[in-house]
Amino acid sequence: MIKILVISGSPTAGSSTDILLRAVAEAAVSELGAERQVQLDFVKINDLQFIPCQACGKAPHEEWCVFHDAISPVLEQIAECDCLVVGSPIYFDSVSAQLKALMDRCNCFRPADFAGNDPKQNFIKLIKRKRPGAMVLVGGEQGWFEGARRSIAGFFIWIEVTNEGMVQYHSKDFHRTGEVADSADTIESAKQLGKKLAAILKDTNAG
């Protein structure tokens, strides 16, 4: 079973972010074909009630976080998935508050001391394998995408996900929900990224 997890940081139903995320994921599933079982999960963070990271400093040991709320199953999905696709609108040159809150809750997935030289470090590296991933970003015509890209790229490194590509869309009218549906080129770019992820998954799950 290949598990593909899609996480949307958009608060809007039917948003351009969601449309592109689904295009990436559905292309990956289609490309994997009937020869492989695929489980596709789509998480809309805005639908969940959870607290932001409390910087408690406590190591959760074999758990992902010492707090248990609606985000707990998502942390489990992040750890178990074979492929992760994350999307967000651009807010103040970065990701949405919804996505940032989720990212912060993944703080305990590994020790901050990457080299393992701190004898007082009681956190452990909870994810032992790398998985392919990709990102989707949607902003305005003058939107600056690099801040959000760096934020998600750093998140990917933290949770052992390799960044295999990005689809970005500059919206011309933020009043129009799902505007990207009219952009055939952008939808096609999303599908091509999904196919790329599928090729990687075929290779890494050949057995």
Image (cartoon, rainbow, N blue to C red):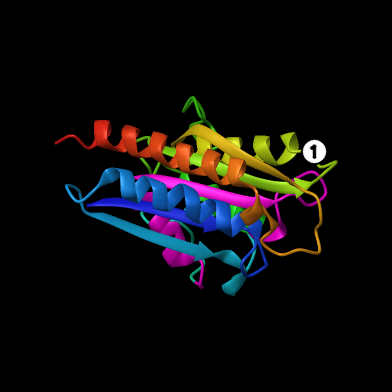
Residue 111 visible here: no
Q: In this view of the protein, which residue sits in the foreground, 82 or 19?
A: 19
In the figure, 105 relative to 204: above or below?
A: below
Q: How many marks?
A: 1
Q: In this view of the protein, which residue sits in the foreground, 7 or 66?
A: 7
- Give the class, few, some or many, for how many residues have Cα within 10 Å of label 1's Cα (few <14, many ≥20): some
Quickly name the residue at label 1: 144
Q: Residue at x 36, y 58 (%)?
A: 40
Examine the structure image and report whether residue 145 is included in the region drawn in magenta. no
Quarter that holds the C terminus: top left
Where residue 44 sits in the image (x, y, percent)?
A: 55, 66
Residue 178 visible here: yes
Where residue 122 sits in the image (x, y, percent)?
A: 46, 43
In the image, 164: left or right of 186? Answer: left
Chain part drawn in magenta:
69-98
Q: Quadrant of residue 126?
A: top left
Q: Quadrant of residue 181?
A: bottom right
Q: Amino acid at mark 1?
A: Trp
In the image, farthest residue toward the right: 142
Q: Residue at x 46, y 62 (%)?
A: 42
Where residue 86 sits in the image (x, y, percent)?
A: 54, 49
In the figure, 187 relative to 131: above or below?
A: below
